[in-house]
Amino acid sequence: MTRVRFLRVDGSVERDIEAPAGANLLDLAQAQGQPLEGACEGQMACSTCHVIIAAEDFERLPPASEEEDDLLDLAVGVTRTSRLACQVALPEGQLTVRMPSATKDWRRR
Ligand code: FES
């Protein structure tokens, strides 16, 4: 199981839940009412699922693919610990996830 903590843009705690390890972070976030559009439904074409992972948890995730990194380069408000939620499987243990200040759908130019 994974203890998932969703933080608002300002860093305050929005929700603390438990979910099965291996579950998709975007699916979970949307099921929990988090403001992540996920416009391309996990096809890595939009970056509207951009989230910021807590530094201590980020290090425990498998690294992003080159394709994910390229799309993150275009995301708004990206940080060193940014990920695309559609590409993250919940690790065993814990995961703290903060919403970004804005998102951008790169399919709509
Ligand atoms: Fe579009 Fe993740 S849902 S990149």
Image (cartoon, rainbow, N blue to C red):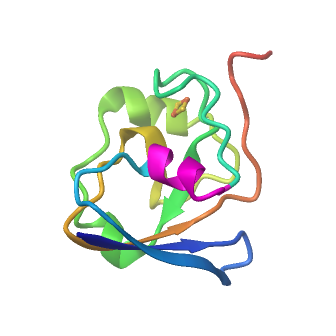
Does 32 lie within the magenta span? yes
Quadrant where the N terminus is found in the figure: bottom left
Name the chief secondary structure element in magenta. Answer: helix
At horizontal 22% and vertical 66% (from top left) the residue drawn is 60
Q: Closer to the camera, 55 or 39?
A: 39
Check the image and name the residue furthest to the right. Answer: 109
Quarter of the figure that contains the C terminus: top right
Foreground residue among 80 and 99: 99
**Residue 94 vs residue 15: left or right?**
left
Q: Nearer the viewer, residue 27 or 58?
A: 27
Image location of residue 19, percent across then percent down: 34, 64
Q: Which residue sits at x=55%, y=51%?
A: 31
* Stretch of the chain drawn in magenta: 26-34
Residue 61: horizontal and vertical position, in percent?
25, 58
Image location (x, y in percent) of residue 22: 23, 51
Query: Relative to 24, is 1 above or below?
Result: below
Specify the farthest residue to the bottom. Answer: 12
Say whether residue 61 is left or right of residue 7.
left
Q: Is residue 41 left or right of residue 107?
A: left
Q: In which image quadrant can residue 2 be found?
A: bottom left
